Image: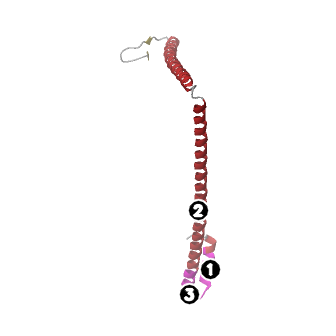
């Protein structure tokens, strides 16, 4: 039960100005019960409003999901038709295309491996150069790679 301070003061003044202490207590209980029922009514109204919003949101979500399923079904049918027509019309060229594609993939993979190896080698040599430059600036030698350590600045 939420009660504002000014409203509570007004209630206490009204109760204090009424007749006997028993009547005052009865009046206060009646006022508090009235406020409680009003708060309960507001809570129920908000619950109904929230439930209607939730129902509307679930309907919207169901409609959106249905539209998405339909769009996915149509796009997959269109794609399947395109691919089957492509292969049916060009049945004599499919082996040539697949051979060219496999050659292209093989070359791309080999070039990627070469590039990765070169990048690693360049990074290693760049690290050695940076360590040597740093040691020259400090005037201390750099220990080269040993069994347990790679590069140490002493």
Q: Earlier along the polypeptide chain: callout 2 or callout 3? A: 3
Query: Helix, strand, or loop for circle 3?
Result: helix
Front residue of 95/121: it is: 95
Closest to the observer, 57 or 67:
67
Image quarter in which the N terminus is found: bottom right
Task: Indicate which label's residue lies in the foreground, 2 or 3.
Answer: 2
Q: Which residue is mark 3?
A: 23
Other residues around mark 3 within 10 Å, as few (<14) / some (14–19) / many (≥20): few
Q: Earlier in the sequence, mark 3 or mark 1?
A: 1
* Residue 29 highlighted magenta (yes or no): yes
Coloration mode: secondary structure
Element marked by disc 2: helix
Q: Position of residue 31 (x, y in %)?
A: 58, 80
What is the crowding at mark 2: few (fewer than 14 residues within 10 Å), some, or many (at least 20)?
few
Dot label at residue 152 = none
Measure how far apart labels 2 and 3 are at the Cα level: 47 Å
């Amino acid at each position: 039960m939420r009660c504002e301070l000014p409203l509570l003061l007004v209630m206490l003044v009204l109760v204090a100005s009424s007749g006997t202490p028993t009547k005052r207590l009865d009046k206060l209980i009646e006022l508090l019960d009235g406020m409680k029922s009003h708060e309960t009514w507001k809570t129920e109204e908000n619950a109904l409003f929230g439930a209607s919003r939730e129902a509307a949101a679930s309907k919207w979500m169901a409609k959106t999901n249905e539209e998405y399923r339909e769009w996915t079904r149509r796009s997959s049918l269109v794609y399947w038709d395109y691919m089957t027509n492509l292969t049916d019309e060009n049945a004599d060229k499919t082996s040539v295309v697949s051979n060219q594609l496999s050659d292209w993939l093989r070359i791309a993979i080999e070039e990627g491996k070469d590039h990765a190896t070169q990048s690693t080698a360049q990074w290693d040599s760049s690290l050695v150069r940076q360590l040597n430059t740093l040691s020259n600036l400090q005037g201390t030698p750099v220990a080269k790679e040993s069994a347990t350590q790679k590069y140490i600045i002493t």
